[in-house]
Image (tube, helix red, strand yellow):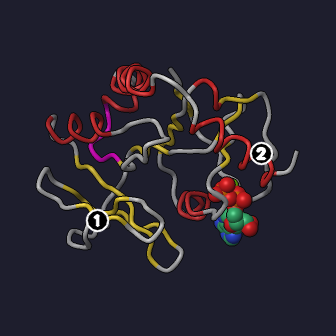
Amino acid sequence: MDKQTLRKEYLEIRKNILDKDIKSKLIFNKIVNTKEYRQCKTIALYKSLDSEVNTDELIDYSLSVGKIVLLPKVIDNDLVFYKITKETILIKSAFGVYEPIEENNYNGNIDLIIVPGVCFDKNNNRLGFGKGYYDRYLSNNSIKKIGICFKEQLLDNIPTDINDMKMDLIITD
Ligand code: ADP
Ligand code: MG
């Protein structure tokens, strides 16, 4: 199956997954217990859409334990990460994604990134929204990458091409 067909199918599947809050909580618990999370000083996260694994608790918790927390913003087709605080205001972008206001552009080291996806496979491959944002961003650095998704989004095998960046680890409920 080609990527575009798979994307359509799994966006629909993702939309209809039940008990997302409970499942997101399970995923949160697993993330914070990884060595990668416990050891990281700086973490890049995403602010979840309704259909995605909810990251609100992870964002709040990470701030409360003193990690440097970054959220992305799409600028000219690239992901740019900004440092946030509890006070940071997030604004809905044209794509419906909540993004931080451009205040604290972050140029330091990032230890860990939590990556959303439409689906993942058992070889740590990822299918995204189809714009290649994360592929392009991750091709330029060597951050530890944890993909998160609900069990329903984990497949045996998804098609990949040369630009697709593999995750180091995938966490599901
Ligand atoms: P997604 O990863 O969002 O599911 P794709 O993998 O289909 O999307 O990538 C979308 C487009 O972005 C493709 O045309 C892909 O070749 C391009 N792309 C991804 N990474 C890079 C890169 N590092 N350099 C140039 N083009 C890239
Ligand atoms: Mg890709």
Mark 2–mark 1 Cα distance, whole angstroms, equals 30 Å
Can you give x and y, in whole percent of width and height, for residue 138 in the image?
A: 55, 57
Depicted 156 relative to depicted 142: above or below: above
Depicted 145 relative to depicted 30: above or below: below
Instruction: Tell me the amino acid under the disc marked 1.
Output: Ile
Ligand 2, image quadrant it occupies:
bottom right
Mark 1: give few (<14), some (14-19) or many (20+) Cα within 10 Å.
few
| Horizontal side, residue 156 vs residue 26: left or right | right
Residue 24 badge: none
The residue that label 1 is drawn on is 91
Which quadrant is home to the N terminus? top right
Span shown in magenta: 39-43
Residue 6 badge: 2
**Residue at position x 23%, y 38% from top?**
62
Q: Quadrant of residue 10?
A: top right
- Is residue 160 highlighted in magenta? no
Q: Residue furthest right?
A: 1
Instruction: Tell me the amino acid under the disc marked 2.
Output: Leu
Q: Secondary structure at mark 1?
A: strand
Mark 2: give few (<14), some (14-19) or many (20+) Cα within 10 Å.
some
**Residue at position x 14%, y 37% from top?**
64
